[in-house]
Image (spheres, rainbow, N blue to C red):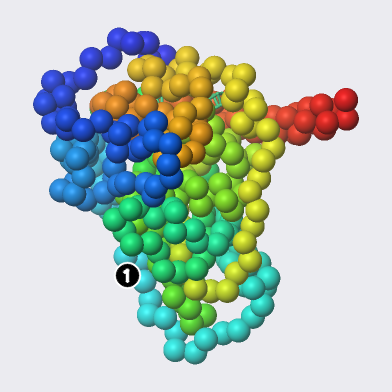
Amino acid sequence: MRKPEKNKFHPDPEQLSLMPDQSGNDINGLGETGFRRPTRIYWHNPNEIPHGGIQKWMVERFNRVPDFKTVYAEGDRGPQTLNPVAGSVATDSPQNWSARVKNFALGHEADLVGIAKMDPKWSYDDCGGDTEPWIIVLGVEMDHARLAKAPSSDTDTASAHEVSVQYNRGARAAAQLANWVRGQGYHSVSHAGPWAGPLTLTPAALACGFGELGKHGNIINRQYGSSFRLSAVVTDLPLLADTADEFGADGFCTRCQVCINGCPVDAISDQKQLVRGIEKWYVDFDKCIPYFNETHGCGVCIAVCPWSRPGAAARLAEKMLHRRKRLKST
Ligand code: SF4
Ligand code: SF4
């Protein structure tokens, strides 16, 4: 990994001139004691969000790089229009549907799949809530060797290119699954990054057992660490919810400093913070986003996380579970 120089970053004046007066941390509800639904902040219609100017600037710079130019515009993201819902409704038990959904997803490009009952709290505050009762979250693994080249530049593109390629794979996996569900006679809609849909996928992925939130603000999974991307399908197909998976990543983060030391702009805090009434690990949006924009998506924190190294997560999870058992028995 190219080691970014700590605190040597000075944002491009052009980007600074587009920076809104409003703090992204305020939009995210940092320091707020009461619960509220999240507010749209990034990867939405740029004309509808305060940070739309810098988002547009970032996307335009990204699209000027030959390696990135066609990755979303021409990359295979699966069918852009989903099939009509079949006229006849197939029946099966929620248990069987859940097994069949997972089987299909894992056989069609997803590396992880989990199911959660839809929670209106995950919808952005101006999106009205998703009306479908279930969300199926998919994960696709990133190639860590390419991710580890973060941060990207116009000439060193491996990491950002890998993220884009995997977002496309996540989009294909979600669209294929949504079409399969529609073929059974049920409603479904797919959501895939990098653009944000009407709901935040991270809390849904936590609820359906993808892992624990890490200090770097991303999920740590017991198989892939943080080296994966999310997509999702919302549906009225009757399903069974999975449960959250806690294996000690949160405790590990309490003692680890790797992402804090790796972040070139000190955006990662050593303490959990109150965000819209919930105490959790939180990345400073205002510090992160200028660097994120100028490096085509940064990603240093997830690349350096010890859990992201190929094969490491399962070993670390086992160690943390063993430690927990030992502490319980003393
Ligand atoms: S680098 Fe360390 S502190 Fe940061 S998320 Fe990973 S395990 Fe947690
Ligand atoms: S993505 Fe943001 S928080 Fe993570 S290392 Fe880069 S600047 Fe820091």
Mark 1: secondary structure: loop
* Residue 139 can be seen, yes or no: no
Three-letter code for the amino acid on which mark 1 is drawn: Thr
- Identify which residue is drawn at 47% across, 28% down: 273
Residue designated by label 1:
81
Task: Report the side of 153 relative to 12 (left or right).
Answer: right
Q: Where is residue 214 drawn, in percent x and y?
A: 54, 32
* Residue 134 can be seen, yes or no: yes
Q: Where is residue 268 drawn, in percent x and y?
A: 44, 23
Quick one: 157 or 320, which is closer to the camera? 320
Q: Where is residue 306 drawn, in percent x and y?
A: 59, 25
Quick one: 329 or 99, which is closer to the camera? 329
* Quarter, ligand 1: top right
- Identify which residue is drawn at 44% across, 59% down: 120
110 relative to 7, above or below: below
53 relative to 127, above or below: above
